[in-house]
Amino acid sequence: MEKALWYLFAGSRGGVNRVRIVRALDDRPQNANELAEELAVDYNTVTHHLDMLQEHDVVEPSDHDYGKLYFLTDRFEQHSDTFERIAAEVE
C-alpha cells in the first residue's frame, strides 16, 4: 500500500487534489458534487481522482448510485501515518 500512496499523492499529477479530497473525506463522507463544491474543483476532475483513489483502495463508495457517498477505507486508515508523511511533502 505504501508504494501506491507515494504514486497517488507524490508521484503523479493531481496529487495535491487527491490529498485535498482525502482530507475532506476524513472530515465526513461526501459525494462528488459536495467535494467539487467544497474544493472549488471541476466535478469531472473530482470523479477522475475518486476513481483513482477507489482503484487503489483508498476510498470506497456507498451502495447508492444517486448521490453516492465516498468513505476512506479501513485499509487506508491503517496507513494514515504514511499518508501524513507524503502529504507533508506535497502540501
Image (cartoon, rainbow, N blue to C red):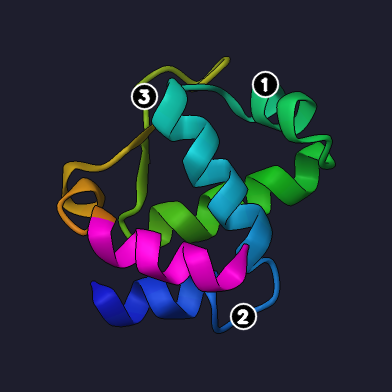
Q: Residue at x 35, y 76 (%)?
A: 4
**Residue 87 located within the stretch drawn in magenta:** yes
Q: Which mark is residue 12?
A: 2
Which disc number belongs to residue 56?
none
- Where disc 2 sits, the SS reads loop
Measured as percent of width and height from the top left, residue 57 is found at: 30, 56
| Horizontal arrangement in the rendering, residue 62 relative to residue 79 (left or right) | right
What type is the residue that disc 3 sits on?
A: Ser
Q: Magenta segment, which residues?
A: 81-91
Is residue 29 placed above or below 39 in the rendered structure? above
Which quadrant of the view contains residue 67? top right
In the figure, 57 relative to 65: above or below? below
From the top left corner, tell me how far across and down residue 62 is, in percent: 36, 24
Q: Which residue has dot 1 on it?
A: 34
Which image quarter is the N terminus in? bottom left
Could you tell me what secondary structure mostly forms the magenta stretch? Answer: helix
Label 3: which residue? 62
Q: Nearer the viewer, mark 2 or mark 3?
A: 2
Q: Nearer the viewer, residue 57 or 39?
A: 39
Q: CA distance from mark 2 to mark 3?
A: 27 Å
Q: Earlier in the sequence, mark 1 or mark 3?
A: 1
Q: Amino acid at mark 1?
A: Glu
